[in-house]
Image (spheres, rainbow, N blue to C red):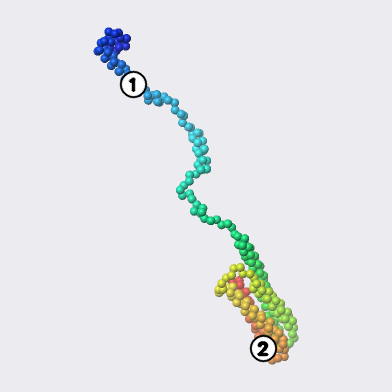
Amino acid sequence: MCDVNCAVPRTRTQNKNPIRNKNCNSYRWRQLLAGCALAIALLPALALAEPQAPSPGPAAATESSAAAAPQATQAPAKSDLDFDLMADSPKSAGPTPEELRRSLELDGKVRLRRQMLTAHQVFGFVSLAALAATLVVGQLNWLDKYHSGDFTGRYEDAHLGLGIATTGVFSVTGALALFAPNPYPKAIRFDTALVHKVSMILATAGMVAQIVLGPVITARVGKLDQPNIALGHLVTGYATFAFMAAGTVAYFF
């Protein structure tokens, strides 16, 4: 056969045969094409036979996730909306020494006003009680001198002493309210504070009238107008007590 003969070395006489040479050349081409086809068919098998890197197990995946978590926490992704509107605004440098001085001065005035007005309340109640006692004793003194006709004079000293004491306590009460600092001035308006002030002003006028009428009554002893002046002194005492009581009630409401 040609295939077998082509495998045997040819002699010079055989090389001169063209038909035989052509068959041998065809046989060699078929062998070459068969080898190429076999190589192409074996390429996928060789690719599958190559060793692959082992895939990470669950433990390795957990460790990689734990390692990536701190990095994500430490370096968060900066969003376009991550900005501070107040970043460029000027920051306060704190109060100046002058502002601190004014604040301390204001606090001192507030504390002093609170203490003085507390004392004003205490002396106000004492003044109201002293004025009531003076009014009762004055009423008895007027009855003894000008109504019953006894003229014993047993209430004169008590009335005089209570009058002087009441005047002193009333003066201290008014001074505490008058000289108390006012760090928060308010506009004048009709309220209980205004009623209290007006009532105390009228009570002060009544006290001044009482102080004037007392010596006048003493100087008019034996005169016909003395009983009338004494009655006016008594009525002024009642009016003063009424104004003072109204001012005290208005202070608490």
Looking at the rendered structure, the secondary structure element under dot 2 is helix
Classed neighbour count for the residue bearing mark 1: other residues with Cα under 10 Å, few (<14), some (14–19), many (≥20)? few
- Percent coordinates x, y for residue 24 in the rendering: 28, 14
> Horizontal placement of 241 versus 56: left or right?
right
**Would you name the residue on which mark 1 appears?**
36
Residue 197 visible in the displayed image: yes
- Percent coordinates x, y for residue 122 in the rendering: 67, 71
Q: What amino acid is labelled 2 in the image?
A: Asn
The C terminus sits in image quarter: bottom right
**Earlier-in-chain disc, 2 versus 1:** 1
Q: Is residue 8 above or below residue 234?
A: above
Residue 228 bears which disc, if any? 2
Which is more toward the observer, 3 or 98?
Answer: 98
Q: Is residue 95 above or below residue 55?
A: below
- Which quadrant of the figure has residue 251? bottom right
- Percent coordinates x, y for residue 132 in the rendering: 67, 78
- Which quadrant of the figure has residue 117? bottom right
Image point 67% across, 88% down: which residue? 228
Looking at the rendered structure, the secondary structure element under dot 1 is helix
Image point 61% across, 62% down: which residue? 98
CA gap between label 2 and label 1 equals 155 Å
- Percent coordinates x, y for residue 218 in the rendering: 72, 86
The residue sitting at the bottom extreme is 224
